[in-house]
Image: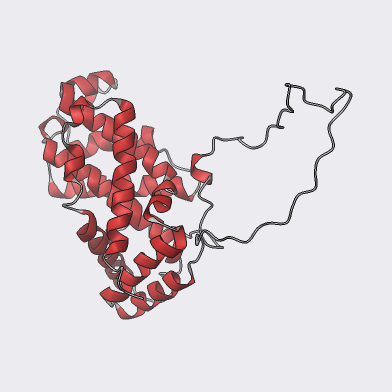
Amino acid sequence: MGTSKGYGGAPSGLVPSWIDDTAPGAGSAPAATPGGAAGGSDGSGPAPQPPIPPSAPDTSSAGGLSGAKGNFTRFVRSGDSETLRRSVSQYVRNGAGSAGKAAKRMGASRSVGKRLLQVIRDIDRVGAAEVLQKLNLTHLAGRPAAEVFIVLLEGMCPPGGRVDEAIARQALLDAVAHLAEIETGTFEEMTAQQLSEFFMDFVIRTIEGRVIADIGKHIVDAPESVVEVEGVMDQLHDFVAGCVHGHLSEHFDGISQKNDQEVSAIVETIYEASFELVSSTAGDLQ
């Protein structure tokens, strides 16, 4: 399955929730004073800055990863599915703080997901041939679907960047590889059902990648072989897919009628619903 095996994760818990939604350079510009002046009250120089108050304690529950990490380590060593459920539930509820907060942390994955779902929307609306023409990819007409999506991938999530961007890219690579394995035919031959399945596969794999990056970065330390590592990854994949798959299809109803803003809202809803599903399955476990 190959999802997220190369990610080291954040060394000190969760990546801050705001990092994925902040534009490059944001926060570096000096704040303007009331009235528009950038200096002191007389305009002659910089205004004195108030002392920085001490950091308040974190009461949001975000960052509480010790329980999730401990249970994930026990899952890796034992293969116990209940321990895996407990770990992922603790990750969402205690580590991120809630399903909504976990979804907001998927900045790059949401961004790629929005562009991918817009392509799927356009295929449903005007047909695959028209979409290829719109994207200046008419030379790929009649080519296997996986080959076309690989080209789209390079534009949606190029290599490089921070961990969150690597998660999105690896998830889409894995989803495309799976698409090639099941031999869906040409890009033009893909059905609406196959396209929605492909999108859900991408979402599932991004969630796996986020979990591994945050609480399973030492996954390769415990198993004694590559086969065991792959077994752990497959079990995580089956768990997330089992929770999510079959519960999200309603979000694709009438997709061809949605504008870009509505498509974005659908992606946001799908991620929050997905995290709620993977955490609620173990809600009674302590």
Q: Quadrant of the N terminus?
A: bottom left
Whether residue 218 is visible to the viewer of this picture, yes or no, is yes
Name the residue located 12 percent from the left edge and 40 percent from the top edge: 193
Q: Tell me residue 240's x, y (percent).
A: 26, 59
- Relative to 69, is 175 above or below? above
Q: Quadrant of the C terminus?
A: bottom left
Name the residue located 54 percent from the left edge and 52 percent from the top edge: 16
Residue nearest the observer in this picture, 41 or 195 = 41
**How many numbered marks, from 0 up?**
0
- Relative to 173, is 66 above or below? below
Looking at the image, the residue that sits furthest to the bottom is 78
Residue nearest the observer in this picture, 90 or 178 = 90
Q: Tell me residue 127's x, y (percent).
A: 15, 24
- Relative to 202, is 140 above or below? above
Q: Tell me residue 219's x, y (percent).
A: 41, 69
Answer with left or right where residue 155 lies relative to residue 126: right
Q: Tell me residue 198's x, y (percent).
A: 21, 44
Answer with left or right where residue 276 lies relative to residue 31: left
> Colour scheme of this structure image?
secondary structure
Name the residue located 19 percent from the left edge and 19 percent from the top edge: 130
Answer with left or right where residue 38 lies relative to residue 88: right
Answer with left or right where residue 272 lies relative to residue 143: right
Residue nearest the observer in this picture, 151 or 104 = 104
Whether residue 152 is visible to the viewer of this picture, yes or no, is no
